[in-house]
Amino acid sequence: MKSILDGRPALKIEIDKVAEVAGYLWQKGWAERNGGNITVNISEYVDDEIKSLPAISEVKQIGVTLPNLRGCYFYCKGTGKRMRDLARWPMENGSVIRILDDCASYVIIADNPVLPTSELPSHLSLHDYLIGSGTDYKASLHTHPIELVAMSHSPRFLNAKEITRVLWSMIPETLAFAPLALGIVPYEMPSSVKLADATLEQVKNNYDCVLWEKHGVVAVGPDIMQAFDVVDVLNKSANIYMCAKNMGFEPEGMTDEAMKEIQDVFCLPKVRPIKK
């Protein structure tokens, strides 16, 4: 069977990144069973032939109108699909969708009629905001990083400033590669509108990674690898913190002065970059 990836090396590279990240999520224990979701805006790789592809599904309602997504194309992990399977067979465990002109519905166009994640409305709402705000961010990731989720069970760490300060102070790389800090969303029902709305508000506040209390994280980035990287470095700091606690002491962490020096020397951003 011919794939949408055939003869399109640039598009294949992006889908290969998705498969690679899916493998990392499984190997790290962050994607039990069918846990986690990935959506990537692939519109820049769409040619006239793809635009002319017929739908292979009926028209599906998103449940919300997203004016910045008219005519956009996304690769989406399939509902009920496992990351460990997506890592090997991305086009059998996900699909490409086209947003229709009403900005409120979509059709699947390739390769198979795999229904996208049940959290598609919340993912697409993030993409709609990111496009409208002028960033070049194209990827959204939801996963369950063990140490970060564990920290969310402590009321102390449900304060964004406090958990960010602790994580940044564990190792310089976390501040360098996750400079926009960690947002917090108090517990809400999974897949609920309240959870989606609260997450969007945190992303609007310039958080590239948002921790859902007792659940997981959502991260956004220019591509799926960079979205993964933000979660990875933050979770490394959480792991260092817990290792120190397991050794019987509260880790000292870098001082505020040391962290300010890193921000100044490396000119770390305080807001999400906008396309020029």
Image: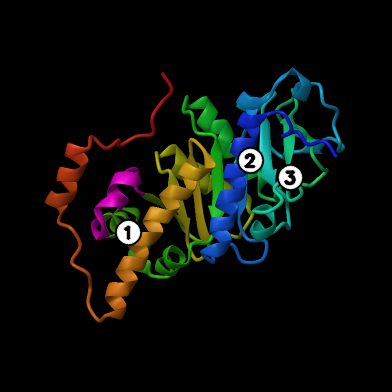
Left or right for 245, reference 148 = left
The amino acid type of the residue labelled 1 equals: Ile
- The secondary element bearing badge 2 is classed as helix
**Label 3 Cα neighbours within 10 Å, binned few <14 / some 14-19 / many ≥20:** many
Q: Which image quarter: residue 126? A: top right
Give the residue number, with chain letter if any, for mark 1.
Answer: 163
**Label 2 Cα neighbours within 10 Å, binned few <14 / some 14-19 / many ≥20:** many
Of label 1 and label 3, which has the lower sequence position?
Answer: 3
> Which circle marks residue 91 in the picture?
3
- The secondary element bearing badge 3 is classed as loop
Q: Residue at x 39, y 67 (%)?
A: 151
Give the residue number, with chain letter if any, for mark 2.
Answer: 15
- The secondary element bearing badge 1 is classed as helix
Q: Residue at x 47, y 59 (%)?
A: 186
Colour pattern of the rendering: rainbow
Of label 3 and label 2, which has the lower sequence position?
Answer: 2
Q: Which image quarter: residue 177? A: top left
Residue 173: image location, x then y, percent: 29, 51
Left or right for 28, reference 177 = right
Stretch in magenta: 169-181
**Circles 3 and 2 in contact, beta carbons < 8 Å:** yes
Left or right for 85, reference 225 = right
Q: Can you say whether 202 is above or below 41 in the image? A: below
Residue in the foreground of this view, choosing between 226 and 133? 226
The amino acid type of the residue labelled 2 equals: Ile
Of label 1 and label 2, which has the lower sequence position?
Answer: 2
> CA separation, marks 1 and 2?
33 Å
